[in-house]
Image (cartoon, rainbow, N blue to C red):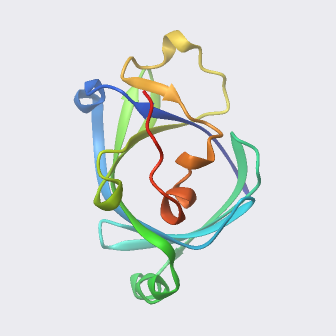
Amino acid sequence: MAKEIERKFLVSGEGWRSEVERSARLQQFYLVAAEDRSVRIRIKDGTEARLTLKFGTQARMRDEFEYAITLAEAEEMRGFAVGRIIEKTRYIVRHKDRLYEVDLFAGELQGLVIAELETAEDVPGGDLPSWLGREVTGEAAYYNATLAIGSRPVEQS
């Protein structure tokens, strides 16, 4: 079992674009989306798929299990999805030797940009990139599972 420790931020600038190392197009959907657990399927670049189970209610840390599945299995399970299918491009951005995942959403969530930093350390504000906006860690409206089944959050930089 792995522990996922992450912080989430709205993105308020374009400065991240010059620091992109790589990107991938993602489609993801949920088979279960509850307050304390989720079951997600993610398809990356239309060529590979993963099944992810997350458990817990703590804002920054949850238990996570992830498994590779076939693309055919993922496509078949899409028929059991709850809510919308999330489409986004994930950019991997390095800033001060830390990797950020910047998600640029498409479809019904177009225009939403969220950055995640997976780290157990407490990063001082001065070490965070200037293009990060308001921290939304622990705000359920910005969880991907909520974005799949709920309404679009009202963004505040």
Q: Is residue 92 left or right of residue 17?
A: right
- Looking at this view, is 25 or 31 the one in front? 31
Residue drawn at x 35%, y 27% is 12
- Looking at this view, is 68 or 39 the one in front? 39
The quadrant in which residue 112 appears is top left
Residue drawn at x 56%, y 51% is 143
Location of the C terminus (image quadrant):
top left
Is residue 20 visible in the rendered image? The answer is yes
> Quick check: 2 above or below 139?
below
User: Residue extending furthest left?
Assistant: 18
> Quick check: 144 above or below 115?
below
Count of numbered badges drawn on the protein: 0
- What is the x, y in percent for residue 63? 73, 55
The quadrant in which residue 146 appears is bottom right
Residue drawn at x 66%, y 26% is 121
Q: Is residue 122 left or right of residue 30?
A: right
- What is the x, y in percent for residue 48? 38, 72
Is residue 42 visible in the rendered image? The answer is no
Residue drawn at x 72%, y 59% is 35
Location of the N terminus (image quadrant):
bottom right
> Quick check: 62 above or below 39?
above
- What is the x, y in percent for residue 54? 68, 61
- What is the x, y in percent for residue 90? 35, 49
User: Residue extending furthest top?
Assistant: 126
